[in-house]
Amino acid sequence: MIKIDAKGVPYKELNEKIHRAIAGGATKIELTHVNGQRYISDGLKKDIKITIDGVPGNDLGVFMDGPLITVNNNAQDAVGNTMNGGKIIVKGMAGDVCGYGMRGGKLFILKDAGYRVGIHMKGYKTLNPVIVIGGNAGDFLAEYMAGGVIVLLRMFGRNGTAETTGDYLGAGMHGGTVYVRGGVDKKKLGKGVDVAESGEEDALLLEGIIKEYAADLALDADKILNERFEKLTPLSTRPYAKLYTY
Amino acid sequence: MGIKSSTPYGKDFGGCGLVGIIDRSGNSIAGSMIVSSLCSMKDRGNGLGSGYAVYGAYPEFKDCFGIHVMYNDISARGPVEDLLKSRLELVHAEPIPVKKIHSIVHPPEFWRYFVNPPAQVEEQGDDEVDDLIVNIVMDINESIENAYVVSGGKNLAVFKGVGHPDAIAEFFKMQDYSGYLLLGHTRFPTNTPGWWGGAHPFTILDWSIVHNGEISSYGTNKRYVEMFGYKCTLLTDTEVVAYLLDLLIRKKGLSLPAAAAVLAPPFWKDIEEMDPSKKDYYTALRVSYASASLNGPFAILMGFDNGILGLNDRIKLRPLIVGKKGDVVAIASEESAIREVLKEPEDVWAPKAGEPIIVTLKEDVNSVGKL
C-alpha cells in the first residue's frame, strides 16, 4: 500500500506520482487530502486499487481500463468519462455528465447524481457498462444511450425520498436498458423510449448488479430488490435515421 | 513556437470558474478566503480575466457611493472628475492601491471616488438617487474615452483585470479587504475579448454579477435594457445581466424569485401542468418579460447589498454547487472550491436547473423586492 498526500498538489503532479508509483510496482494506492484534482487515474490500464479521501476533481477515471477506484466522499463532474473497464465506487453524490460515452466497466454512486448521466453510453459484445445511482438523478439521464445498463434507485439521495425521474429521460436512446426502481412518470420520458414492467430475465440481471452494488456500499440488497422496476428500452435503433437524409 | 504559455502546463482549459461566500451573520470574511477558494479552480480559467467583489469593503464610507473607475489612459481622469463634481458631492478621492507584479503588464490605472448625491436629488427619494448614479455610470462608460466604471455601489469594492486569480488578487492587494459577502471569478473568454473591462464581476449600483456560460440571447436582452436607458459598453454578454436585474428588481419591483423566473423561466410544457394560480403567474412573467429571459448555458451568481442569488439555466448546462457550514454559505462551480475554505461543510448539494438559490443576511432580509 502506497500513500500519497495530495494536499495542495497540482493535478498533473499528483497524476505523475500515481503513474510513478504504479511503474514502481504499487497495486494499492491511497490518496489523502484530495481536493479538486482532475483526471485521477486517467487512462490507467492496470489491475490496481485506488482509494480516495476527499473530493476528486472532474474527469475521475477518464479513459481508464482496469483500476478499482473507491471515493470515500462526493465526486464532481464527468466521473468515468469514456471509461473502458474497471470500477468506480462513489460513497457520496456525483456531479453532472458522469459516465459520458462509457463503454465498459462499472460506476456505482451511492447518493444523487447530476444532470446528463450516462449520455452516449455504449456497449459492444462483452463490453457492457453499468451505472447504478442510489439517489435521484437530474434531467437527460441516458440521453442518446446506445448500450449498457443504467439502474436508478432513488433511495439514498440527499432528501431521502424518491423524486420523479429527471426530465427527458432516455431522449434519443437507441440501445441499452434503463431500470427505474418504483417506475417512471411517462411525462418525463424523452422521445423514442418504450416502458415496460421488468421481467424474469431482467430480475436475474438486476439481482446480479444490485448484489454487487450493495456489497460494495454496505447496503441491504434484498431491500433494494423488494420493489418493482420499470424497464426503458429504445423504440428504434436509429431514431434519427431520417434527420439529415431528407 | 516561442510563445510563452500563461499556464504552468502549457495548456489552456475551458470553463469559467465562479464562487461566492456569504456570512449570514454579517461577520467579516477575509479577502484571502475568496482568493484561496477561487485559486483552487485556477485551471478553469486561462488568465484572460479574473475579479472579485467585496461587500462591506468600505465601512468608513458605507453611506457613500464608492465609484471605482478604470483609466486606460490617465488623461481621462480630468473629464471623469469634472463630471462627478458637477453632478455629485465628492467626499473623497484616491488612487486604488496596487502592487506592481511581474505577470501583469501595462495595467490600466484605477481610482476610487466616494460620493453623495446632491441634497435636491436626495429629497426626491432613493429611486431618483439610484437613477442618477446609473445615468452617471452610463455617461462615463459611453462618452468619456478610456474611462470605465468598474463598480459604483455602497460599501462595495470590485477589483478585476486581465490575469489569473492569484495575480489579480496580489495586484489589487485583496488581503487588505474583507466583507460579509465576497464573489470571485476566473475567466475563460469564449465569444468576446479578454480585456480589463471584460473581466467579471459586472456591476451596477449594488448588483454584481459573475457568470459562467454564454448569453445567446444577448442581442434581444441588450435591445430590451437599452429601451430603459442602460448602455452596454463593455463588450461582454454578462454586462447585460447586471442591468436586467437592476431593471427587474429595482425599477419593476419584482421579488428575487420572480426575477430569477424571468431570467430562467419554466418551460411552457411545465407551466401547462401547474395549478391555475401558478400557471397564471408564470404565464404573466413569461409574457411580460419575454425579452428579459436568458437563452444559452449559464451559471450565475448575483451579489446584492444583503445577499446572494445563484441561478442556473433551465437545463443546467453549467455546474453550480452549494455548501453550508453554520451561517456561512458558499456557492461555486466546483465542490472542491467550497471545501477549500469550508472544512467539513454540514451540507453540500447541487441546485436544480433554473432553481434560484437565495441566501440573505439574517437581519434586513426585506430590503429587496416589493412583489
Image (cartoon, rainbow, N blue to C red):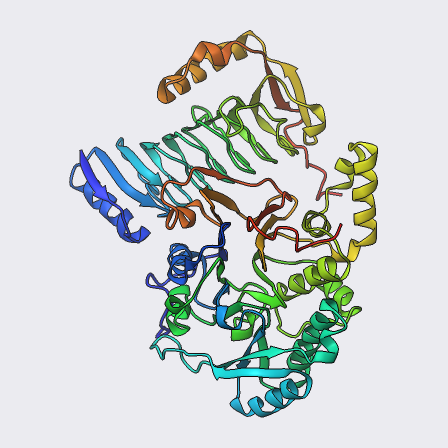
For the residue pair B286 and B78, the one nearer the viewer reads as: B78
Spot occupied by residue B95 in the image (x, y as percentages of width and height):
47, 83
- In this view of the protein, can residue B71 be seen by the observer? no
Q: Is residue B360 left or right of residue A214?
A: right
Q: Is residue A172 left or right of residue B95?
A: right
- As drawn, the residue found furthest toward the top would be A200
Q: In this view, does B133 lie above or below B351?
A: below
Spot occupied by residue B17 in the image (x, y as percentages of width and height):
48, 56
For the residue pair B89 and B346, the one nearer the viewer reads as: B89
Spot occupied by residue B100 in the image (x, y as percentages of width and height):
36, 80
Query: Residue A50 sits in which quadrant?
Result: top left
Query: Residue B169 sits in which quadrant?
Result: bottom left
Spot occupied by residue B151 in the image (x, y as percentages of width and height):
57, 71
In what quadrant of the picture does the N terminus of chain B appear? bottom left
Q: Which residue is drawn at 34% across and 42% down?
A: A43
- Tell how many labels: 0
Q: Is residue A16 left or right of residue B55?
A: left
Q: Which residue is drawn at 67% across and 75% down?
A: B133
- In this view of the protein, can residue A184 be seen by the observer? yes
Q: In this view, does B291 lie above or below B266?
A: below
Q: In this view, does B102 lie above or below A224?
A: below
